[in-house]
Image: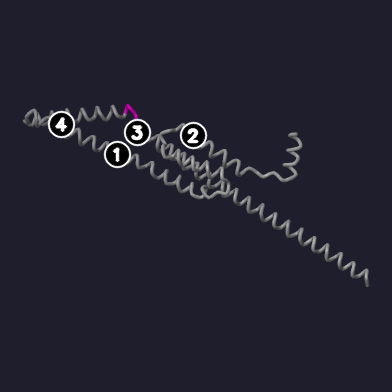
Amino acid sequence: MDKLIELMNSSLVSGAVIAVLASWLTSRARNRQDQQTEIGALRVQADAMTVAVVELQAAAAANRLLWDGPAERARSFLLAVMASAGGAARARIAGGTDAQSAQVGFGRAAELLSRERVASKQNAAAVREPLTRAATAAAPLMRCSDPAVVTATEQLLNALTDVANTARLEVALEAFGRAVNAATAPQLSWWARRRAVRAGS
């Protein structure tokens, strides 16, 4: 009878150990799967942020090329002078006085510059859409559990406020990429970390 009780106690203890071990392994596997899901989501969010930043850079570069360069300003000035001269000449041909010719010329130049300004503002508004996409992509990154990713996202958003400063934006984008890579890098097991420490010493 004592042997039977001892055998039952032994099987209960081993059953409890097996149950605890199975529970630990299940929990560990679930945690690893959750971690992989979180890493996958972080990569998708970071890619969306990077694409939005690149789109914003392209829109800002196109805006600078089309409207902000010295050649474009000179072109606008030349067109305004030509419109003014053409309007004045027409008014003079129609029998207007010098003052009337000048007024018509200035009116034509103002009309042309007004259209140019409207077109410039519409083109500048094209930057708003990629900027909105960048802000939308940044929202989930600001809730990331890794503080380095949150900090890098904040710095990137701050750099986006001055999109003309391309050097600052490039530095912020690189820092963001490094933070995301560090956060999504595979985690070494306890044994692998221990071996790396031993190899380093």
- Say whether disc 1 or disc 3 marks the residue closer to the N-terminus: 3
Mark toward the viewer: 2 or 3? 2
Circle 2 — which element? helix
**Nearest to the observer: residue 67 or residue 196:** 196
Q: CA distance from mark 4 to mark 2?
A: 46 Å
Q: Earlier in the sequence, mark 4 or mark 2?
A: 4
- The main secondary structure of the magenta stretch is helix
In percent of width and height, residue 16 lies at: 79, 63
State if disc 4 and disc 3 touch (CB < 8 Å).
Answer: no
Instruction: Give yes or no for contact between labels 2 and 3 (Cβ–Cβ under 8 Å).
Output: no
Q: Is label 3 in a helix, a strand or a loop?
A: helix
Give the mark nearest the N terminus, 3 or 4: 3
Question: What separation in Å lies between label 4 and label 1 (alpha carbons)?
Answer: 22 Å
Task: Report how far apart the C-alphas of labels 2 and 3 lie in the structure.
Answer: 22 Å
- Give the image location of residue 114, x and y in percent: 23, 37
Q: In the image, what residue occupies the spot 60% across and 44% down?
A: 183
- Tell me: 142 left or right of 18: left
Where does label 1 land, which residue? Answer: 119
Residue 66 is tagged as: 3
- Residue ID at (77%, 58%): 21
Are there few (<14), some (14-19), or many (20+) residues within 10 Å of tag 4? many
Kindly report which numbered mark, 2 or 1, lies closer to the viewer in this rendering.
2
Q: Is residue 29 above or below residue 182?
A: below
Residue 170 circle label: 2
Q: CA distance from mark 2 to mark 1?
A: 29 Å
Type of amino acid under label 1: Ala
| Quarter occupied by the C terminus | top right
Residue on which disc 4 sits: 105
Where in the figure is residue 177, as x and y percent of width and height? 55, 39
Comes first in the chain, label 4 or label 1: 4
Amino acid type of the residue tagged 2 in the rendering: Glu
Q: Amino acid at mark 3?
A: Leu
